[in-house]
Image: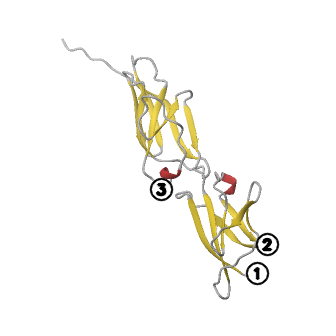
Amino acid sequence: MTLLSTSTTTLVHHVRLRHAALLRPLGAARGALAPDTWGWRARVSGADTIVTSRTGAGPAPAHVDIVLAGGPYSAALTLPAPVSGQLAGSVRVALTAPEIEVDLAPVPMALIVELVDQGTGAPRTGRTVRVVPQAGPAVPLAETAVAGMYRSADRVWSAGETSADLVVGATQIRKVTVDFTRVQTRIRVADPT
């Protein structure tokens, strides 16, 4: 006698991690259910972690641990504090809805501007330098001990601040963008004022 059985696999959760400032999906390398439960599976496809269940599966797992793929942004993100039993370097996500997006904030970053004279290339000192983002208040850049160097305080840059106007005194010089792959973005700018 041959006994055949069928099993149906159902998509239960679709989880995606995003960069909070860029609003871009972050690649995942691995997904693991917590707790690991018979009949349930987590698999990764690009930036998506898919959680499925089979017919007759055990109780639903409460979380999935998602390990970020290497990618250029992974080293400059603030991950939530891990809990006991969580995969190293992962983000634990509660499985509370069919579609889940989790935004991960970048680490505090600084913008450094080397301001030089347009004609001579000599450092420009004593200037008032600020960055005026599309959204939010202006970000001042204080002059450092190095002549011609201006630096913002370390801060978490938001989505509305990813592109901004560099202003010296009252003159808009150029557009600047924070590089979210590193903790310091350094640019050299010729001051025409």
* Amino acid type indicated by mark 3: Pro
Q: Residue at x 60, y 47 (%)?
A: 20
Q: Which mark is residue 193?
A: 1
Image check: 81 left or right of 20? left
Nearest to viewer (mark 3 / mark 1) = 1
Q: Is residue 173 above or below residue 97?
A: below
Image check: 88 left or right of 21? left
Q: Residue at x 69, y 54 (%)?
A: 160
- Write down the quadrant of residue 33 in the picture: top left
Judging depth in this view, the residue of 124 and 163 nearest the camera is 124
Q: Residue at x 76, y 70 (%)?
A: 128
- Write down the quadrant of residue 110 in the picture: bottom right
The residue labelled by disc 2 is 169
* Amino acid type indicated by mark 1: Thr
Q: Report the quarter where the N terminus lies.
A: top left
Q: Is residue 84 above or below residue 155?
A: above
Residue 23, x across and y down, in percent: 60, 49
Q: CA distance from mark 2 to mark 3?
A: 34 Å
- Write down the quadrant of residue 172 in the picture: bottom right
Secondary structure beneath disc 2? Answer: loop
Q: Is residue 185 above or below residue 189?
A: above
Q: Are marks 1 and 2 in contact (CB under 8 Å)?
A: yes
Secondary structure beneath disc 3? Answer: loop
Q: CA distance from mark 3 to mark 1?
A: 36 Å
Image check: 116 left or right of 66? right
The residue labelled by disc 3 is 72
Residue 91, x across and y down, in percent: 49, 38
Dot 3: few (<14), some (14–19), or many (≥20) neighbours within 10 Å? few
